[in-house]
Image (cartoon, coloured by chain):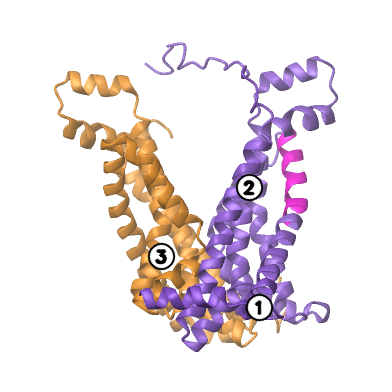
Chain colours: A orange, B purple
Amino acid sequence: MIADGVIDLGWVFDHLGDMWEASVEHAVLTGIAVSCGLVLSVLLSLIALRWRRTYTPITWVTGILYTIPSLALFTFLVPVFGLSLLTAEIALVSYTLLILIRNIVSGIDGVPDDVLEASSGMGMTARQQLLRVQVPLALPAIIAGIRIAAVTTIGLVTVTVLIGQGGYGVFILRGIRRQFLTEALVGTLLSVALAVVVDLLLVGVGRLAMPWARRAGT
Amino acid sequence: MIQFLGDVLGYLLDPSNWTGARGLFSRIWEHTSISGLGVILAGLLSLPPAVLLAHRRRGEFLAVSAVNLGRALPSFGVVGVMFPITLSIAALTSPLGYWATLIALVLLAMPPMFVNAFTAVRDVDDSLIEAARGMGMSESRVLLGVEIPLGLPLIMAGVRTAAVGVVATATLGAVVGYGGLGRYIIDGFAQGNDVLIFVGGLLVALLALATEVGFGWLEKKVDPLRSRRIRPPRIPTLRDTGIRTHP
């Protein structure tokens, strides 16, 4: 499809090792962000579910964080934390919060009342209800949120090269500096590929975690 | 910290930083003009096919692909790929980085606009469309007079999402040599000047938030049902009537 000379396949084969290294870096940056984001989101969701009035301010603040462009968010952190991994991760984590909290809370809210009544009729305590009824039934929404958060984060990690981090952004930035299409394209396509792979992995995790959903044919 | 914020304020209050070709006014104009143009072009390219396909109940697969592609494509990568491509086309080389940024903005703004407009028209209540047809409306009247007005809030929500993304991505134009507010951030990084970095970030953040709030206001404004006390009656679904969908 692409004419010879436009894409330098020789460069691609010479840099397979670099690509692997960048993939690991990219996956690690993403993994840290999504797992920290998930822990924080679960805590904030529990607060929002326990004290209803906190839900609006929580979505407000996380909504503002979500709206602020990544590069701008980095700049607010650079004066304090410098061009560091911490700066990158704080910004990346803050982007996952809105997506995850919204899905966790609406997933748990979506559990039908009659199911809750049945479980309390069975003598379950509030904690048992949450862990054995609400969370399992909210799992499809929660996993959908994790998928969106992970795919979005993978795209955003490419920008962290501008504050000195690694990953596929390194290829993109070098491609720009050298005006070398192959390198920029490799960085972009690898990022898309990682997003697809991670998304499929999470679908698989969801299936393993929810055997009942598969039986119901959904 | 206080000292630092004072420096930032001092920079913003110095009139000489606002005027001139590299001043804040011209950077803000560079940023907003390319963003506005990007949103308009993306709207022209994505909204008509979206509403037409949705009206004909086609293109479901395209819509799903657009959602996934829109999310997985890294904006920085698209800018980065467009830069060498535009430089290889003589007509697109100047001003430096402008065309690469603009094309990237359009490409990235299209998926959210397409998806929302498609969903908006597809999800208009079937009974309303049948009523419109029963009244003798032509297909184009149904689309223009019923489906699009009722779907407008959701269509505008897509435009808002796209516009906020465009404002964010326009910042990256500075990496490929275009101006805009990203210039302060990128130059600040290069010079190790935290005040410059912060000024750029602050203005980009404010611009993005203003875009979000402004389009959010517009979204409410265009809702044809906003002032009606009587909303279209909700058709009872199986769940509402108490009939169990499965035993």
- Closer to us: mark 1 or mark 3? 1
In the picture, measured across the screen, residue B73 lies left or right of residue A7, that is left
Q: Where does label 1 land, which residue?
A: B23
Q: Where does label 2 land, which residue?
A: B215
**Chain designation of label 3:** A
Q: Is residue B90 magenta?
A: no
Neighbour tally class for label 1: few under 14, some 14-19, many 20 plus, Cα within 10 Å? few
- Residue displayed at 60% across by 86% down: A177
Q: Position of residue A76 (x, y in %)?
A: 43, 70
Vertical side of B35 occupied by A8: above or below: below
Secondary structure, mark 1, is loop
Give the amino acid type for the residue marked by disc 3 in the picture: Ala
Q: Which residues are magenta?
A: B42-55
**A132, A126: nearer the viewer:** A126
- Residue displayed at 65% across by 24% down: B125
Q: Position of residue B106 (x, y in %)?
A: 70, 61
